[in-house]
Amino acid sequence: MATFTRRLALLAGIILVAGGCNLTYLPFYLFGPEPKYPPEYHPLADKDKKKEVKVVILTYTGLETNPELLHADRELATYLAQHLSKLCQANEEKVTIINQRKVEEYKNNNPDWQQHVGDLDVIGKKFGADWVIYLELGKMSLYKPGSADQLYRGQASLTVSLVNVNNPDDVSLPPREITFSYPSESGGGFRLRDIDTPPHAFRREFLDALARRLSWQFTSHPTRDHFRCE
């Protein structure tokens, strides 16, 4: 009953914002199982849900000269691990994310590791992983261009690679180029910088939102988390 009531409340909001969207599937949303979007890239979980799958997340960014974005790649990896673990658990998928502290320890002990990105499967085997998620961050900023750093507008461009450790030559998984902005246009497109939201707080919010979005690449997520007109 509580679930149905929650869906009714959400439906009211959907009707208000949907406008010209196709509402054909609303009866299925109300009376069927909670609808979900499938993984946008490739699922991590095995078809046999009883089989445990281990995943290591590697992130890399070039020399970062902006102190407000220092170690953003590490923070992004931590948030992605959290979101993936939560979603996979909700989807009853037996996916284990390798502890990010162990990953950072490996990177610190092997400072030239990034020169071997062509052999990510080798790195994955060192962790006993089945999959390697590799994120290479490109341009990243916290402010809307031309705003003199007074308007927040998180933007990131990155390359996402997924390597099957047991089949590294699988050509069906080419890297994906992803761009992300936060807040989105539907969310206002920017946020005013004020005393209640210092840069470090917005950075945390931005990276968490990016990680949440990236987690959708690898496992299903509820439509209630991603309802919009396509």
Image (spheres, helix red, strand yellow):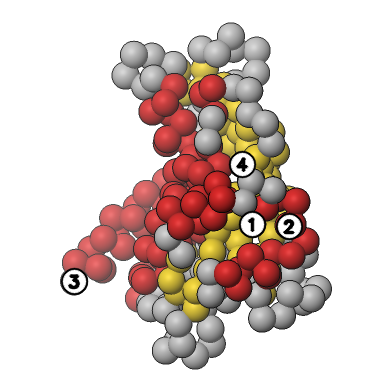
The amino acid type of the residue labelled 1 equals: Tyr
- Please report whichever mark, 1 or 3, sits nearer to the chain's N-terminal start: 3
Q: Are marks 4 and 3 in contact (CB under 8 Å)?
A: no
On screen, residue 173 versus residue 77, left or right, reads right
Q: To which residue does mark 3 refer? A: 1
In the visual, does 169 lie left or right of 55? Answer: right
N-terminal label among 1 and 2: 2
Q: Amino acid at mark 2?
A: Val
- The residue located at (26%, 68%) in the rendering is 4
Q: Are marks 1 and 2 in contact (CB under 8 Å)?
A: yes
Pointer 2: residues within 10 angstroms few (<14), some, or many (20+)? few
For residue 39, above or below residue 214: below
Q: Position of residue 125 (x, y in %)?
A: 60, 73
Disc 4 crowd, CA 10 A, few/some/many (<14, 14-19, 20+): some
- Dot 4 or dot 2: first in sequence order is 2
Q: Are marks 3 and 2 in contact (CB under 8 Å)?
A: no
Depth check, mark 4 against mark 2: the one in front is 2
Q: CA distance from mark 4 to mark 3?
A: 37 Å
Residue assigned mark 2: 117
Q: Secondary structure at mark 3?
A: loop
Q: Amino acid at mark 3?
A: Met
Please report the residue visible at 69 percent of the width from the left and 64 percent of the height from the top: 120
The residue that disc 4 covers is 180
Instruction: Say what secondary structure mark 1 lies in.
Output: strand
Q: From mark 3 to mark 2, how far is it between C-alphas?
A: 50 Å
- Label 4 and label 2: CA atoms lie apart by 23 Å
Report crowding for label 3: few under 14, some 14 to 19, many 20 or more residues within 10 A (C-alpha): few
Task: Quote the CA–CA distance across marks 1 and 2.
Answer: 9 Å
Q: In the image, residue 127 lies at what x, y percent?
A: 53, 69
